[in-house]
């Protein structure tokens, strides 16, 4: 649940799934590969979903290791919760304890003003300076960049987002935004993909269990350091879906008859942008289905297909974001 799937491990280390839609009497196979090999799999009911667990053999920092990994739930509440990565770790800077922050020293509480942040318990790194450049988000709305710390409970910062009004009282509703994510020793030496607050950042290599957060920079420009309040870091993979050869009400249902796909209407549900094109096309050269970042609905795309007897299209997602396709209808130009 919520999707009936039978899971199994093949001898070559691939994870196979057989999904069955009983209302349509349709079954479909899908395979899953990772940086390593699957050795065993089981499914455990947890809450609203049945969760897949797998034992995976990986080579990390020159050593062979085995990890027990858990598939993330299909459901996610916000864009920042999207985590389409393997062996990922999550940093969530949300304050979940009783520690309060008090903000003082502002005049008009506008961007650029320097203020003081006082915590009710040890919160800031001191005498270390590792908090410098990180951010605090106040009430989920207003960001303050830390410029210095004078003790474990007092820091100085610059307002990045103008406040609607002066903070009236201490609050427990705040979060850390970090420019360095640690605790990634299980992926030491691996190039990882990063999603921070729902935005895909530049891939990085894990060094000493850490990665630096950098935006995707334009060609020829230096990468910009950024911060993330909820960050997912893990091994990337490519999601790919290919349509079946179409059956058309002509002689032999059109099988073996050459044709070219010219347009496709793709129905999506909570999907990020991805690429679509003819089967056999290089992923980066396929047309980009660029609707909203969390799009539900139909998108009509030019496919520019090649002449073939299969007349299939390919949909590819190379980012660690969702590609949820519930239907595809396309136009075929027929040849001889």
Image (cartoon, helix red, strand yellow):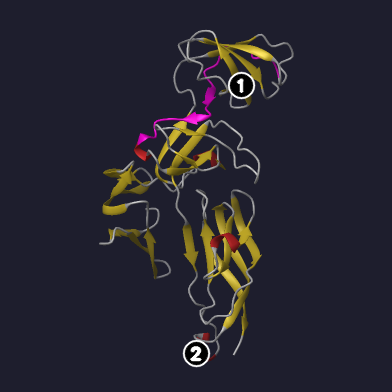
- On residue 252, which mark appears? 2
In percent of the image, x 62 and y 16: which residue is there? 157
In percent of the image, x 31 and y 46: which residue is there? 59
Question: Can the viewer see residue 311?
Answer: yes
Circle 1 SS class: strand
**Residue occupied by mark 1:** 145
* Residue span colored magenta: 165-185
Residue 283 x %, y %: 54, 61
Point out the residue furthest to the right here: 108
Q: Is 27 a magenta residue?
A: no
Contact flag, marks 2 and 1 (Cβ < 8 Å): no
Q: Is residue 192 above or below residue 333?
A: above
In percent of the image, x 52 and y 50: which residue is there? 319
Q: Is residue 331 above or below residue 70?
A: below
Instruction: First in sequence, mark 2 or 1: give its number.
Output: 1
Who is closer to the viewer here, 149 or 75? 149
- Crowdedness of circle 1 by 10 Å Cα count: few (<14), some, many (20+)? many
Q: Nearer the viewer, mark 2 or mark 1?
A: 1
Q: Distance between the Cα atoms at labels 2 and 1? A: 67 Å
Q: Is residue 143 above or below residue 5?
A: above
Residue 89 x %, y %: 41, 37
Residue 252 x %, y %: 49, 90
Residue 140 x %, y %: 59, 27
Who is closer to the viewer here, 213 or 290? 213
Seen in the image, is 183 located left or right of residue 143? left
């Amino acid at each position: 649940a919520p999707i009936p799937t039978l899971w199994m491990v093949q001898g070559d280390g691939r994870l196979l799934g057989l999904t069955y839609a009983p209302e349509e009497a349709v079954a479909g196979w899908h395979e899953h590969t990772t940086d390593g090999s699957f050795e065993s799999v089981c499914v455990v009911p947890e809450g609203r979903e049945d969760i897949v667990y797998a034992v995976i053999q990986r080579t990390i920092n020159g050593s062979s290791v085995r990890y027990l990994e858990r598939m993330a739930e299909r459901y996610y509440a916000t864009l920042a919760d999207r985590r389409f990565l393997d062996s990922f770790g999550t940093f969530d800077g949300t304050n979940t304890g009783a520690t309060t922050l008090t903000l003082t020293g502002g005049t008009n509480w506008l961007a650029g003003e320097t203020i003081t942040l006082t915590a009710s318990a040890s919160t800031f790194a001191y005498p270390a300076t590792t908090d410098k450049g990180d951010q605090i988000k106040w009430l989920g709305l207003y960001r303050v960049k830390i410029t210095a710390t004078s003790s474990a409970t007092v820091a100085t910062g610059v307002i990045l987002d103008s406040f609607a009004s002066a903070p009236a009282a201490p609050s427990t509703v705040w979060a850390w935004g970090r420019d360095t994510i640690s605790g990634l020793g299980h992926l030491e030496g691996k190039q990882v993909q990063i999603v921070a607050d729902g935005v895909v950042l530049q891939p990085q290599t894990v060094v000493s269990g850490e990665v630096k957060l950098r935006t995707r920079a334009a060609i020829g420009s230096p990468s910009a350091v950024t911060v993330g309040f909820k960050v997912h870091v893990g091994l990337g993979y490519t999601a790919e879906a290919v349509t079946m050869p179409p059956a058309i009400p002509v002689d032999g249902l059109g099988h073996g008859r050459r044709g070219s796909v010219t347009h496709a209407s793709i129905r999506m549900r909570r999907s990020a942008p991805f690429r679509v094109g003819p089967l056999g096309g290089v992923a980066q050269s396929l047309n980009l289905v660029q609707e909203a970042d969390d799009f539900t609905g139909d998108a009509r795309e030019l496919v520019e297909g090649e002449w073939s007897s299969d007349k299939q299209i390919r949909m590819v997602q190379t980012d660690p974001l969702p590609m949820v396709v519930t239907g595809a209808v396309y136009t075929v130009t027929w040849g001889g």
